[in-house]
Amino acid sequence: MTVSVLLMVSLERADAQGWPATFDGRVQWIAGGLMVMQLDDGTSVSVDLLRVPQYQYAALVQGERILVIGVLPDGGRRVMATSVVRGEEQSP
C-alpha cells in the first residue's frame, strides 16, 4: 500500500470493520461490481461497488473524474465503496 493511500484515510475508525476513506481520481475500468481507479499520483485502487447504488456508476466511462467514498477494511485489498460522485471535469 502506498503512503499516498494511507494519508487519505481518516484517523478515526468508521466501524469495527475498517477505516473511512475518500479517493479522488479517474476511472480505469469497470466490470460488474468492481472498478479500478487511478489516483492523481498514478496509483491504482480497486473499488468494490456492491454497496453503491447502480445509478451512481452505471454511466461512468474510462478516464472520467470521480470521487469514491467508502471504507478501507482492515487487511483488505480494495476499498468498499458506499458512494461514487462524478466529477465536473471530463477526459478529452
Image (cartoon, grey):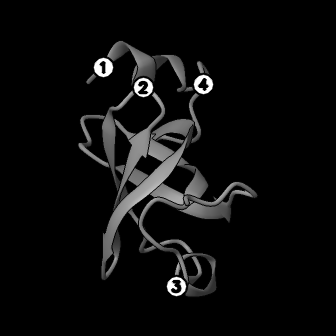
Residue linked to disc 2? 41
* x then y, percent, for residue 34: 31, 69
Q: Residues within 10 Å of mark 1 (few under 14, many from 20)?
A: few
Q: Amino acid at mark 3?
A: Ala
In the displayed structure, does residue 8 sit left or right of residue 86? Answer: left
Q: Which badge, 2 or 3, comes first in the chain's sequence?
A: 2
- The nearer-to-camera label among 2 and 3 is 2
Report how far apart the C-alphas of labels 2 and 1 lie in the structure.
10 Å
Q: Quadrant of residue 56?
A: bottom right
* x then y, percent, for residue 64: 54, 61
Residue linked to disc 4? 10
Report how far apart the C-alphas of labels 4 and 2 lie in the structure.
19 Å
Q: Which badge, 1 or 3, comes first in the chain's sequence?
A: 1
Residue linked to disc 3? 58
Judged from this view, the residue extending furthest toward the front is 92
Residue at position x 62%, y 63% in the image: 83
Q: Which badge, 4 or 1, comes first in the chain's sequence?
A: 1
- The nearer-to-camera label among 4 and 3 is 3
Which circle marks residue 50 in the picture?
A: none
Q: Amino acid at mark 4?
A: Ser
Q: Residues within 10 Å of mark 4 (few under 14, many from 20)?
A: some
Report how far apart the C-alphas of labels 1 and 3 lie in the structure.
29 Å
Q: Is residue 66 visible?
A: yes
- The nearer-to-camera label among 4 and 2 is 2
Residue linked to disc 1? 2
Q: Residues within 10 Å of mark 3 (few under 14, many from 20)?
A: few
Above or below: residue 60 compared with residue 18? below
* x then y, percent, for residue 78: 30, 48
Residue at position x 55%, y 58% in the image: 91
